[in-house]
Image (cartoon, rainbow, N blue to C red):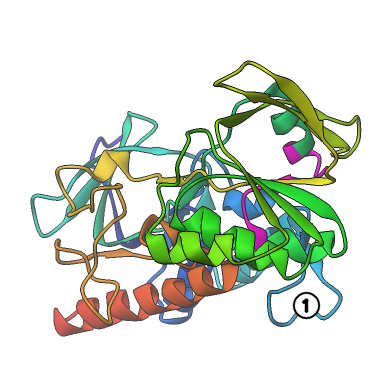
Amino acid sequence: MSNTPEHVQCLIIGSGPAGYSAAIYAARADLKPVMYEGPLPGGQLTQTTEVENYPGYPDGRTGPEMMEDLKKQALRFKTDVRHGWITKVDFTGPVHKVWVDERTEIHADTVIISTGANAKWLGLPNELRLRDMGGGVTACAVCDGFFYRGQSVALVGAGDSACEEATYLAKLCPQVHMLVRKDHFKASKAMVHRVENTPNITVHFNTEVKDVLGQDKVEGLTVVNNATGAESKLDVTGLFLAIGHEPATAIFKGWLDLDEQGYVKHQPDSTRTNVPGVFVAGDAADKVYRQAITSAGTGCMAALDAERYLAARGH
C-alpha cells in the first residue's frame, strides 16, 4: 500500500451552506471537489429548527432538512463528501498540505475554507438543553425573531451587535429585556442611543442569567443582580444570546492573515486570502451578516475564484 499523499484539485473544509454551495459550483466546473464535513456536519444550521428566510423554500424548512437538501445536491454532482476533521495545515508551498484527524495527509491545488463560526453561550444546562430542542434559546435575532412576534423576550449582550439585535426585536416584540453583565455598555454611543430611544427595551445592568425556566420551551428566566445578589424572575418566552461568535479558524493561525477576533481576512471583492490558492467563504470570514444566504453566496464566489486560479495555471 502506497504512503503517497492523496492529491486533489479542490479541497473544501467545512460543510455548512458556504461549503456545500462551493462544492456544487466546483463540481459543476469539474474540479472534483473533496469535502471534509468537520466536527459539526451541516454546520450551525443543523442546530436551527425553522428556517423561513432562505429563498426557494416558500413553506420554510428545518435547518437539518435544508442541509440535507444541499448535501444531496452536492452529491448529485459527484462531490466526494467525507467524514473527518482537518487538524493541521501547511501552506508553505504551491501545493497545500492538510492532515485529516491528525494522520491522513492530503495535498490540494486549491483549498476553500468554510469552517464557520460558533456562537458563544452562557453554558447553563437548561439553556443548552432548550437550545438543542428548539425550545426558545437562540443566538440570531434576525433568523428567529419572527417566531416571537407579540411576545416578551430577553437578550443578553452589551456590544454593538447586541444593541442592533435588541432594536430589531423591539420592532416585533412588545417588551425586550436587555441583560448587561456590567454597569455599562460596550457598544458605541450611537448604538446605545438607539437602545435608549426605544421605549419597549428595558435595560438591566449588573444582571446575569442564573437559570432558564421551562421544560419544553422557555417560560421565564431567573436572573441575579451581581452587585446586590438579589434574584428575580423575568416572564419571557424567548432568550437571545448576543455575546459574540468565535470563528473556527484556530488551525489557520500563522498561515493566514486573521483579524483580532480570528476571522480570516480576504482581498476586496474576492474570497482570496493572503495565500495563493486558498480561499475563504461563509462565517469564517463574516462577522457582519452571518446568514445562510450570504454564506451560500460566498461559497459560490470561492468556487469561481478557485476555478479561475486553476485555469490561470493551466489546470
Task: Tell me: residue 126, above or below residue 277.
Answer: above
Left or right for 97, reference 303: left
Q: Estimate how packed mark 1 is, as few (under 14), some (14 to 19) or many (20 or more) residues with alpha carbons within 10 Å.
A: few
Quadrant where the N terminus sits is top left
In the displayed structure image, the side of residue 123 where residue 262 appears, left or right: left
Which image quarter is the C terminus in? bottom left
Image quarter for residue 219? Answer: top right
- Can residue 178 be found in the magenta stretch? no
Residue 114: x and y in percent read: 42, 57
Residue at 52 percent across and 33 percent down: it is 181
Residue in view at x 23 percent, y 70 percent: 272
Residue 63 is situated, as x and y percent measured from the top left of the image, at 72, 57
Compared with 99, 59 (above or below) is: below
Q: Which residues are magenta?
A: 131-141
Visible residue check, residue 15 = no
Residue 287: quarter of image? bottom left
Residue 218: give x, y in percent of width and height.
Answer: 84, 39
Which of 71 and 248 lies nearest the eye of the viewer? 248
Q: Amino acid under label 1?
A: Tyr
- Relative depth, front residue between 229 and 149: 229
| SS under mark 1 | loop
Q: Nearer the viewer, residue 66 or 179?
A: 179
Residue 137 painted magenta: yes
View extreme (left): residue? 93
Would you say residue 218 is visible in this rendering? Answer: yes
The residue under label 1 is 57
69 left or right of 167 in image: right
Q: How many marks?
A: 1
Q: Nearer the viewer, residue 309 or 124?
A: 124
Query: Residue 39's spot in the image, x, y percent?
Result: 52, 38
